[in-house]
Amino acid sequence: MQVKVFANLRVICGGVSVEVHPNGDRAMDVLDKMIEMFPDLKEEIYTEEKKLKPFVHLYINGRNIIHAEDLETRVKETDQLALFPPVAGG
């Protein structure tokens, strides 16, 4: 499945879009596979308790996972995922 990444995550992941083949069907499985592929990603997106950091957002088909089942949200191969890091600016 394709995951679009934004801002500084593009540098870590080497581009705008990452092909991910997770070992499961939850949002957490997708992120875990991405961290396996790009270890520096872990510090950017997860807290020590393995929860998304404040202001890090994962969208599945345009819907933020915090409005679904958070990291337990189910994903399908055809879903569109987008991962946003905290962004500041004005």
Image (cartoon, rainbow, N blue to C red):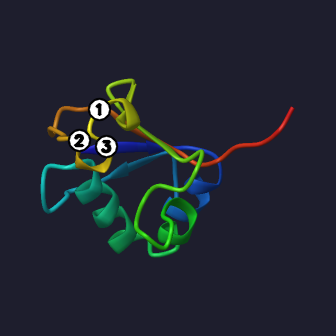
Mark 1, residue position: 68
Position of the C terminus, as image quadrant, is top right
Mark 2, residue position: 73
Instruction: Determine the secondary structure under disc 1.
Output: loop
Instruction: Determine the secondary structure under disc 2.
Output: loop
Which quadrant would residue 49 be assigned to in this image? Answer: bottom left
Amino acid residing under circle 3:
Gln
Which quadrant would residue 4 be assigned to in this image? Answer: top left
Amino acid residing under circle 1:
Ala
Residue 29 x %, y %: 23, 58
Q: Residue at x 77, y 42 (%)?
A: 88
Image disc number at residue 29: none
Check whether the beta carbons of the residues at disc 2 and disc 1 lie within 8 A of each other.
yes
Disc 2 residue crowd, few under 14, some 14–19, many 20+, Cα 10 Å:
some
Query: Earlier along the polypeptide chain: callout 1 or callout 3?
Result: 3
Q: Residue at x 23, y 41 (%)?
A: 73
Count of numbered labels shown in the rendering: 3
Mark 3, residue position: 2
Residue lying furthest top: 62
Horizontally, residue 11 falls left or right of residue 58, namely: right
Horizontally, residue 82 falls left or right of residue 76, namely: right
Mark 1 or 3: in front is 1
Q: Is residue 67 above or below residue 49?
A: above
Residue 58 x %, y %: 42, 41
Amino acid residing under circle 2:
Thr
Mark 2 or 3: in front is 2
Query: Earlier along the polypeptide chain: callout 2 or callout 3?
Result: 3
Return the residue nearer the eye: 62 or 50.
50
- Tell me how far mark 2 sits from mark 3, CA to CA: 16 Å
